[in-house]
Structures are given as C-alpha cells and as structure tokens.
Image: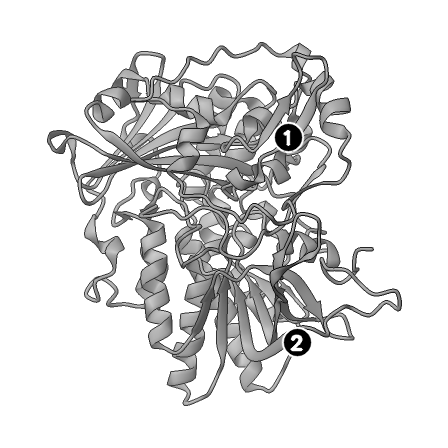
Amino acid sequence: MPSPYGTGPILSNGEHEMSERESMPFDVVIVGAGPAGLSAAIRLKQLAAENNAEIEVCVIEKGSEVGAHILSGAVFDPRAIDELIPDWREQGCPMAATPVTENHHWVLTKTKKMAIPHIATPSFMHNKGTYTGSLGNLCRWLAEKAEELEVQIFPGFAAAEILYNEDGSVKGVATGDMGIGKDGEHKADYTPGLELHARYTFFAEGARGHLTKILKRQFDLEANCEPQVYGIGLKELWDIDPKKHVPGRVIHTQGWPLDDAWGGGFLYHQANGQVALGFVVALSYQNPHLSPFQEFQRWKTHPEIRKILEGGKRVSYGARAINEGGWQSVPKLAFPGGALIGCSAGFVNVPRIKGSHTAMKSGMLAAEAAFRAIQADRTSDELSDYQETLNDSWIAEELKKVQNVEPCVDKFGGTIGTVLGGIDMWMRQLGIGLPISMKHDPDYKHMGRADLYPKIDYPKPDGVLTFDRLSSVFLSNTNHEEDQPVHLQLKDPSIPIQVNLPLYDEPAQRYCPAGVYEVVGQEEGNPRFQINAQNCVHCKTCDIKEMSQNINWVVPEGGGGPNYPNM
C-alpha cells in the first residue's frame, strides 16, 4: 500500500515503518550535488560566515561521487559563479581553462552546411564571455569549495523517500535501504536507510526528479504553469587529431538528419585535445520509429562532422533528459518545508542551450531565503520570498525573452517554427515582444501510431565513427547491483505487449539511449517485454515519453548508475 506522504510502505495502522532508521538533524538538506545544490550549500555557508552564525548543511548525491551523474555539453555562462565565487578563475576552477573563442551555427543538409551569420541572432546567442568544459568537473570543484566551508556531502546516498511533519510540511528525506534482493527480501548485507531531518529541504535532483514528481502532485505546484517538456541529450567525448583541434571553437547545428522532429547537434573544442559532441532531440517527436541514439550516430556521418572526428577515438558516452519548457513551465517553487531549485524546477534557456548558470542562481536565491528564515527562527514554512526574488531576478528576465521559441517549433515544425520563434525572440530583445505565452502539451501525448509513420532505415554502425548502444553504455561506466528490485517500475505490466507493441511498435526499444528495453521472442510468436535495468544511465526518457505514463523511474541503490569522467 503506497504512502500518501512518500514512496515507502506504511503499516496496517497507517504509521510509517521507520523504527530501524537512524536520523540526523540539519538546518538545510539538499538533494543532489549538481550546480544548483552545491551553489545553494556554498551560499548558505557564506551567509553564515558573514553573519557570524552557525548553520548545518548537508548535501546527498545518488552518484558514487560528485560529478558521476552530471552530463552537459557544456558551454558555461559565468554570470552566477561570478556572483558566488568572484575569484573562481584565479582559484583554479577547471571550467576556466577554455574560454570560447569562436561561435558557429550551421544549418545542415545531408551533405552541405549553411552558416548563419551572427547578425541574424540576438547578442545573447553569441556566447561572448563563456567557457567550454566539463560540468561534472565543475561540480567536483564546487564540492571542494563547499567542503572547505564545512558543508557535509554524502555521495552514494540516494534520496528515496520524502518525510513529512504531522502538519504535512516536508521534514526531510530518507535515503534508500541497501541490501534488498530482487525478491524484496533482506540480504545478509542489508542496511536500512538514513533519515535526514531539516528545517528546509532543497530538491536539486535535475530534470524529471522522481521526488520532485511527488512534490508537484502533493502540493499542486503545477496548477498555474504549463507542463514541463523535455529533450533527450546524448553526448560523446573524443580525442581528436591535434592538427584539427582549436580550443574554444563552438559549433551548433540544426536541420539534417532530423526531418519532422526538433533538435540539433553540438561540437565543442575543449581542453586536452578533446571535443565534446552531442545531439538533442525534443521528446515531442511523433514518429514512433525514430531513435534519438541512431539520429546522433547518423549526424556524425555528415561530411563537416566526419572530417573533424576522422583519426580520433571515442572515449566516453552518456545521455540525460533536458528541460525544454521554458519560463511558462516553471512550477511554484516553494512549499511548506522545502523548495525546488535548478533543473528540478526547469530554468534551461533552450535557444542558448544553457541552464547551469540559471540553476546556480536559483540555488543561491533559495539559500538566501532559507538563511533569512532560519535567522528569524522559522522552520518548515513556505519560503515565499524565494519565489518573489526569483521572479524579479535576471533568471526570469533571461527566460522570458525566449519563452516562445520551443512552443513555436512544437506547433509549426522545425523550419517555420524556428523562423517564428526567432522573430519573437528578436522582438522581446527589442522590448516589443508579443504579449502571449504559448502553451505546451506533455511529450507523451505527441506519439503517433506506428502504421501512420514511415520506418527509418538506420545504417549499421561501423565501430569507428558510429557505434551501437551496448558498446556506448560500456563507455559510460554504468554499474548497478544486479540483485536488487528493478528501479524501472511498470504500473501495468501488460501495456508494453498488449498496447504499445501493436499500436506503436513499442518505441521504448528506440527512445531509450542505453538498450534497457527490449521486446524478445517476437519471431517465435511469443513477445515478451524485457527490462535490462543494469544498463540504465538515469536519463529519465522512459519516465517522460511512455505514452500511457506506465513507467515510473525510482532510484536504485545509492552509488548505482553511470560514472561519467570529464563529462
């Protein structure tokens, strides 16, 4: 029987089964050691030092180490970190190693490219003053700065459950139990989860956080906003021929190989002779035969991309869902006892393909609101001033300028939608934008029937430039304890074969970038839906795109999942 106030079981008398757990009290608990969570922790400790106050801050991270689950391009806007740690460059932050020196935007056909001149786009699209590097390594560096300020960081601990006070306010979180077998029984190494209690709990889980989903329902946080929509971002890291490497060169593409779907590619020349390249596909696509992974592999065969990679070697791979809803999809941010920060809320600037700076700033604003509340001896109430200050911040100003770009493409298609979205973006830049905020439909509602769309003939991988999913997952260093409950839960196990297979040719086989979902036994006339949970890279695509919302992604044992180096 599911608990109304969490994800764990309840006893027959209605009380939660907590007797085995130990608890630890903090002033603020932060779920997720990404840019938002770590910035919030640092800002809280800075304020405590400035005001000669004591404040206990804890950050828990489901990855085996800080940065293990962080995946981004990334081209990094330093606006927030300039506020948080003004001398970050002088302190040796790895993100400072490669300033962006060139900015290119190409429209691709199958064999050609057309460069879009800078004059055609507003100045905020030009990447002036930005840097390119590993967001995971930035988070590792931020974690060091946080620990220097005596923030307690616990990697390898997954927040599995929300805890509530008697009045319904958030009390904290509980980490997942360790040592439970597939059958649900305790193994010899069973260890119960730990309760982390706090005056305020910040949820910085990233896009489509599983606890954030519960909070949105529990506190009706999306009552006055559009539903969040997403893209799936896939990324590889390559060592390339030094003669071809131009540190700081940034390339974005749109057009081929996508036809009806919206998305595009990126290729960033970063430090150490490496390029980070990737492909993003909006999850509003309709053709169930489309495979985002295969589109990425096909994109690399374009002559302009191929010539950069030839002679190089792929060294890493990963995938992660990205918020694409924009300002109109930002939910209510504060609720009794907690707040959403970073990509748990969704502050990505979609045309700029940037969200780390806005995530960091949101964490800083939440920290300032929580510090004021704690200084006033408040606890577990609603941090309404966080919402107010964010609405008046440069986050809101930046996102409002681009709020209609994604929905224009969604409504009118790639070519016309890009033109209309660009016009609206220019008008808003000039202060004369249309006084409307376009609406979204959830991504899962867009999927079309398989018989209404053409199958896509993807070429076989050559093992040099293009690859299959299993060899790619190997490079993500993904690992899960195999003897544990499956963390990809089917609400109705019959739907994949009885509904999705005949109507949609079960697109989970294709939208998952890690080969988690397979239909086996189809040739023998006995199809069966197989879940290879150990392959999961925690991208959350299945939780988003499944047509009847039948897949519920929950956390596996802490420390499981990918271990991304330099991503």
Looking at the image, the residue that sits furthest to the left is: 243
Amino acid residing under circle 2: Ser
Residue lying farthest front? 188
Q: Nearer the viewer, residue 273 or 374?
A: 273
Label 2 SS: loop
Question: Is residue 333 visible in this depiction of the protein?
Answer: no
Q: Amino acid at mark 1?
A: Gln
Image position, residue 62 (x, y; %): 51, 57
The reply, left or right, for residue 202 in relation to residue 472 is right
Kindly identify which numbered label has been placed on residue 380: 2
The C terminus appears in which quarter of the rendering?
Answer: top left
In x, y percent, where is residue 2? Answer: 79, 56
User: Along the line of sight, which residue is nearer the eye, 48 or 541?
Assistant: 541
Looking at the image, tell me whether mark 2 or mark 1 is earlier in sequence order. 2
Left or right side of 440 for 66: left
Q: Which mark is residue 530?
A: 1
Q: Would you place residue 281 above or below residue 69 in this image?
A: above
> Toward which corner of the image does residue 110 lie, by quadrant?
top left
Residue 148 in which image quadrant: bottom left
Q: Is residue 268 depicted above or below 19 in this figure? A: above
Secondary structure at numbered mark 1: strand
Q: Are marks 2 and 1 in contact (CB under 8 Å)?
A: no
Other-residue count near label 1 (Cα within 10 Å), few / some / many at <14 / 14–19 / ≥20: some
- Image coordinates of residue 269 in percent, x first then y, are 23, 38
Q: Which disc is residue 381 wearing?
A: none
Does residue 376 lie above or below 409 as drawn? below
Residues 112 and 533: in front is: 533
